[in-house]
Image: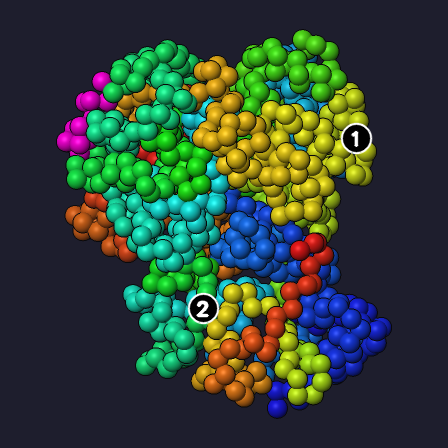
Amino acid sequence: MKRRTFFKSLGATAAAGAGIGCTRETVLWGGEANAAGPTDTRSQGMTWMKAPCRFCGTGCGVEVGVADGKVKAVRGDTQAPVNKGLLCVKGYHLPAVLYGRDRLTHPQLRQPDGTYKKVSWDEAYDLIAKKYQESIDKDGPESVGIYGSGQWTIFDGYVALKWIKGGMKSNNLEANARLCMASAVMGFMTQFQSDEPMGCYDDFELGDDFVLWGNNMAEMHPVLFSRILEHKRQHPHVRIVDLGTRRTPTTHYADMYMEFKPGSDLAIANGILNLLVKSGRVDKRFIEENIVFKRGIEDLDKIGYGCFGDNAEKYGFKDKGQASSFEEFARLLEEYTPEKVEELSGVPAAQIKALADIYGDSKRGTVSLWCMGVNQHTRGTWMNNLINNIHLLTGKISKPGSNPFSLTGQPSACGTVREVGTLNVRLPADMLVMKEDHRKKTEKIWGIPEGSLNPKPGFHTVDLFRAWHRGDVKVLWVQTTNPWQTMPNVHRIDRKPGDGKFLIVSDIYPTPTTAVADLILPAAAWVEREGMFGNTERRTQHWHKAVEPPGEAVEDAWQMVEVARRMGYTDLFNWPDDDWHRVCWEEYRSFTTGVGKDVGTYEQLEQSRGLRWPVVEGKETRYRYAAGHDPYVKKKEGVHFYKAKANGEKAAVWFRPYHPPAESPDADYPFWLCTGRVLEHWHTGSMTRRVKQLHQAVPSAYVEMNRADAAELGINDGDKVKLTSRRGTLTLPAKLNGRAQSPKGSVFVPFFDEGLLVNRLTLDAMDNISKEPDYKKCAVKVERG
Amino acid sequence: MRVHALLLVFLVACIDTPQEPIDEPVEKTPATERADRRAYDGAPPVMPHDNLGASCTNCHAGQAMQVDGLGVAPAMPHDATPGLSDDARCRQCHVPVTTDHIFKPNEFEGQAQDMREGDRLYAGAPPVMPHRTFMRENCVACHDGLDAREEIKTPHADRTRCQQCHVEAVTDTSFPH
């Protein structure tokens, strides 16, 4: 602590007391100041405010300590129901992400010689408005786009949606949650016709068995994993099953580890369904009351992978549902015998049976958990369907302690992208641009003419960037995300500015994406502005602005409001300039009320540590669709899937077969490559790498290898290793004795390191329904570097 | 000694000599070094050593211990941290330092360690805690043992229920509890 800050905080301490000056007691013993009353001198002049953590989808509550206009500390909020005072190492080091010396502080416009020139906000806003308008006039609204993020606040997402869909009449609005959560969305939508989980975090203290599908929870959702571990410690009957393609820190805590071949989780889930159905360990009454059976398109040749042949430019596969029956479902499952599943997955038949026994035990509560392993999967929606199927057939759903629960990786993937609907086909609260009644409702709330919204879906993310690369999309604004690091097969969008297109990037630090921008805008981060996030368990959390942003940085939402107003959409954003968040919130909230998606009022959220929707008469909902919990369920007991109107308010169980991955190892590229995160770094590392403690723990990317493979190739720990895929090459150090172990024939590389871009190797294969890319499976060659 | 040194430092602080750091540790001890390894008061300290291949709790137990060739292993202050048992996830919060390298400079200035004593109602009354516990329930991890700082050492470590008399003030937030 510098003397100057000490002096200032001392002044604040003294002022908080009786206005006394420098006395020895005030500082060392706090006598007089304390005597003045409840003002706490121990706070060193700090003001403490509440906020959700900036990082993952868990949504931990933190108390933010502010002094001298700067964030000086955070502490886990002991009264936050999510984390009960605990944080992870990223959360504890959160304040430092605001203070990297290279924060972006002024709008900067790229010059023809490649340098950037400082421009005023007025110049920047005028230029953006001009670029959008020119492109729309010349090539139509399909030629412009906005690409946002699950790190957008709900305000940011709502402004973007209203401006582009309600104003510019383009549906080219996407967000990086497409790369992350889209398969979970489509899982819920195809089965329940409403997005987001029925369960909540309370299950971590109520479940008996926790089944982790390809989910390294110990590193990716550490605070939630701690809740399970503590529950297990107190209740020794609790069991954890870890299904994975590599041993991770999570495996260490598992009662059973099932290592499967990449992509074969489809076979395992079908194997379990087969055993449950065959042995009658299903809830017949629940099935009769609540379930319909369906089949979709199952022919591999018709579906493809979104990256080969014609699909390499545009992937528009549409599934088509048809009615099926329990009998047909049972018959289709028959081929997935434990032995066949063992052959496909490498998991011993005995383990398949053991897992079926866990799901089939009606006396024990079972919680299934998954995240990127299931979602970033060429059949990710199918995997979501299969896990949900297991819970539906056994009736282990919408029950305290028994639920399928998909975890999210970003702080507002749910609140912003999924609930506001910042995706090519969506409108708020589960509505779709293709549906006339949904458009009508939206037009009415926004006060725009009936029939004016564009009914044609925009590009999904991978196709949006392909279209950008082709030049079909000419003006694109990227906010709060870093696609030039995160897109699969990223060299496909390599760019040199000056190509006639216009890329605007709002961020807080320089990234590989700002490096290719025409206009760079400085954004206010986290508590430098007011915000709302929605976490994994449907909890909406509000925070107030606590400190000023650096330089001229402006919050993302307001940047867009300024441009929209300049384009003439003043009626859409006729909000007061000062207290606009409240007005914006109540407008957005009107989409959610009365349809089972009811978010809390501004005041309710301001005064609480978040509330889980639907919030009706001030009361949150722990378990959706459950009698006695969900106010929309009028039944006395059981469940009611009231959102699934097209299926007679019943959930759909889909038969979904096994399909192989898009690219598997062969003689030329004999290794599997899996990519992912590590505990210390978050996403592309643009924030966490600027924190000394986090950077120094994991300073660069590496390739995690099996020791037997390394020995065969003569590779020692730390040696340079060259990875080659059909897309590109990357040389990086080997890690043989790290925190996780890849099985023989596979390697793992984290994606946080902008200096070692693993997405130069990955394949842009996608899920057929959600269009979410598969970052977990492609083939590489491994050589000494 | 410590109090005098602080007093001296403080008096210097009262005279306007800007930019001088005032919190030079009086003497380096394992405890002050641990404070230096925190990003701010209350942040989990980073690990000063690599993973040594054993369970963390082998050395970081209820009391500080001298480990041959390595120095003092501080006691573990967490009694009731969620998950703390054989299933402890120490690495969830405590990460090693594997390099001196910095990715980009950072100007974050953390809240300094608070050196005030706890407030007493009258001489002889038990002081309230001058700090938050941050899940450090094992008070003697810092307030007793071979690496404890003299000025915060408890005179009665044998009384095991510290929070029976010493309470934690938790009312300094600006939002409703």
Q: Residue at x 31, y 37 (%)?
A: A362
| Image coordinates for residue B138, horizontal then vertical, percent | 48, 73
Q: Is residue A5 left or right of residue B71?
A: right
Is any atom of residue A264 visible in this view? no
Q: Is residue B115 visible?
A: yes
Q: Position of residue B8 (x, y in %)?
A: 70, 86
| Residue wearing tag 2 | B79
Question: Foreground: B122 or B30?
Answer: B122
Quick check: is A335 in the magenta stretch? yes
Which segment did they paint magenta?
A331-343
Q: Quadrant of residue A631?
A: top right
Is residue B35 found left or right of A527 in the rendered image? left
* Residue A60: image location, x then y, percent: 54, 49
Secondary structure beneath label 2: loop
Distance (Cα) linking label 2 and label 1: 51 Å
Which mark, residue A557? none
Residue found at the far front of this picture = A636
Q: Amino acid at mark 2?
A: Asp
Residue A372 falls inside the magenta stretch: no
Callout 1: helix, strand or loop? loop
In the picture provided, is B107 more to the left or to the right than A570?
Answer: left
In the image, residue A451 above or below residue B25: above
Q: Counting other residues with Cα less than 10 Å from the Cα at mark 2, is it few (<14), some (14-19), or many (20 or more)?
A: some
Give me the disc on residue A575.
1
